[in-house]
Image: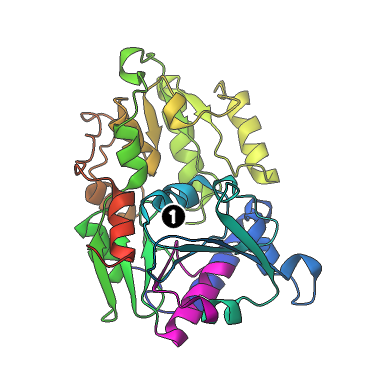
Amino acid sequence: MALIHPRSLERWQEWRNSRRRAIGIHRAVPPPLRRATRSPGSAASSGYVLHTRDGDDSAPVLLGVDTTADTTRGGLLVALSYLHGSAAVLAPAGLELPELSGPGWDHQHLADPRRALDELDVSSALTLGWHREVGRLVHEWALSADVPSAVVQHDVLSPFAPPLPPHTTFLAWSGADGDFQRAGRDDVEVRVVGSQRLWQAGHEDSGSSEAVQVRPVFLGQLASIELPRRYTFGAAHSYCRFTDALYQPGPEETDRLSRAAHALLRRRGVDLQVPSLPVARQERPVVAVYSADVLEAAVRGLPAWVHGPRMPTWVHEQWERYGMRPTGAEPTPAPPQDADEPARLIAQILEGTA
């Protein structure tokens, strides 16, 4: 199954909004996205900060940042340490980015950053996509200014991933991911850089493989908009009841329906792992319906599987694309990692040296 909306961002946003309303997880929408949906005149929706840092004499590289999530740091901000030239980061006002608070960074508050970007003489731009406020602003500006732009992959891909902006480069984890994301497009280039998240996991000494406990943990995905809850809850319930696994609520499982599901699991004898632990701190086998967490766990030496009875065909296709193994089979193998760090490759691509 290919992307449901390979070109139209507006149609993808309509689908996303309908799914969030249908499953009642409006509280799980990240703050920057809620901010973008308010009226243009509201105080919270006006204002950006342009963070700039001088480098060598080359034109600056522009990064568009919408959130403080780990994906932002692992996909975007980590490349800053490898940029030799000047750098600029556009973000919503009020977004705390400690990486940009050190010496050498200047900060300019702007109501409309387009004029400031015109004056910067930017050489290239990078975002996590144009499905959020700053990302869309950056890509629309780059297209009008004839500035090369790129989108870096930050998660496993499903048919419900947002479409890429026009005339951009996709920095993919693998060739298979690149082919999947650009299917049906003739205006997108693909460069394979690998996953910074998985590369870092493979270069950290977590010690997880030395102290793996027997009882597994099922990583919850009730707030997923890609799958109805009957699939995600059913998979968690069946696995935890059958294996006595712990259930770890997902980070966005704070809405009323999710809390009710947690209560039902408890009544049926399932223990919850609260507070939730990141993969780097897990000491148990890891199971999920589908998640990059499964790949990270495998890289860290933890037994990891996927589980989902009667899942749609696209879920099985995704398992196959990433080499995720279903429960009952051998654990998911760690994805191969190149010797070079993805962040370094990304910086080289942005500066035109790779």
Name of the residue lying farthest toward the front: 57
Left or right: 84, with 316 as reference point: right
Left or right: 70, with 178 as reference point: right
Q: Looking at this view, is 239 or 330 the one in front?
A: 330
Residue 256 spot, x, y in % from top left: 70, 44
Q: Residue drawn at (29%, 81%), measured in percent from left and top?
A: 187
Task: Determine the image quadrant of residue 290.
Answer: top left
Quadrant of image for the N terminus: bottom left
Magenta segment includes 142: yes
Left or right: 313, with 213 as reference point: left
Is residue 309 visible to us here?
A: no
Quadrant of image for the C terminus: bottom left
Q: Looking at this view, is 310 or 246 the one in front?
A: 246
Give the secondary structure at mark 1: loop
Q: Residue drawn at (66%, 42%), measured in percent from left and top?
A: 254
Q: Is residue 231 above or below residue 4?
A: above
Amino acid type at circle 1 is Leu
Q: Is residue 170 above or below residue 81?
A: below
Give the magenta part as a residue range. 119-146
Task: Determine the image quadrant of residue 334.
Answer: top left
Name the residue beneath numbered marker 1: 76
Q: Is residue 237 above or below residue 4?
A: above
Magenta segment includes 22: no
